[in-house]
Image (spheres, grey):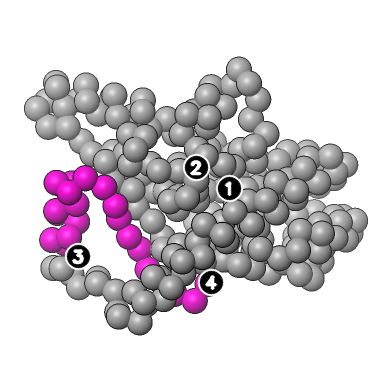
Amino acid sequence: TPGNPTNALVDLQLMAKIADKIGAKQGTRPPIICDNTLLGPVYQQANLKGADISVYSLTKYVGGHSDLVAGGATGNTEWLKPVRALRSAIGTQLDPNTAWMIMRSMETMALRMERANQNAEKIANFLKTHPKVFAVHYLGFLQSGDIKKEVYDRQCLAAGSTFAFEVVGGEAAAFKVLDNLQVMKLAVSLGGTETLISHPASMTHSGVPKATRDLLGISESLIRISVGIENADDLIADLTYALSEI
């Protein structure tokens, strides 16, 4: 949580309470494991909000330069013991150079995420009023009174820089937007210094049955964007042109 690509939220405190009840009933409490890649560790500290283990694709915001492949887990020592044991058994320790690159990247992680977050807010506001965009799944647009807004306020420190929007015209229109971008890069990753954009229904989630995609809100008109640290005006100009080609 937030979920990819729609930014669906899961209430970690509620999940922890449910896990406690299950533990009291059966004698063994199941761990709450949160994929904290989209906002953490800067804008969501899942371990402080109810998660026993936070897992990360360190390739994304932590690495931040689209030049390494790594994963990580943080949390309670007792829960992490079997994780460490399995890592040692199957040999998934990082090589020294990749570990050094992650340490280097962590020095600028907060700065990169802050700039990307600022850019994302500007782009989301631009898309919100565009006549060819009918939905923007940006956490900063959650309204008071919505249970998701309550979870967001309690759990998250910012809206982040990865979100999705939907264009009028379905898949054909979405493809036309992607084909006419010149600054943004068409790719399925996220969290780098460069802005990446993709079509989840035909890319990251192409193997998911359509009925399941529909249930998750991943429509043919949905475009996901991971905003980078470029000049926000350049990114908005890029989207302006691409949307005009629909």
Q: Earlier in the sequence, mark 3 or mark 1?
A: 3
Q: Residue at x 17, y 32 (%)?
A: 29
| Residue bearing the label numbered 2 | 2
Secondary structure of the residue carrying numbered label 4: loop
| Residue bearing the label numbered 1 | 160
Q: Residues within 10 Å of mark 1 (few under 14, many from 20)?
A: many
Kind of residue at badge 3: Arg
Kind of residue at badge 2: Pro
46 with respect to 186 (left or right) = left
Q: Which residues are drawn in magenta?
A: 65-86
Given the current orientation, which residue lies at the most extreme right position? 244
206 with respect to 137 (left or right) = left
Q: Against 150, is 49 above or below? A: below
235 with respect to 109 (left or right) = right
Q: Earlier in the sequence, mark 2 or mark 1?
A: 2
Given the current orientation, which residue lies at the most extreme top position? 145
Q: CA distance from mark 1 to mark 4?
A: 17 Å
Q: Residue at x 60, y 17 (%)?
A: 145
| Picture disc at residue 199 | none
Q: CA distance from mark 4 to mark 3?
A: 25 Å
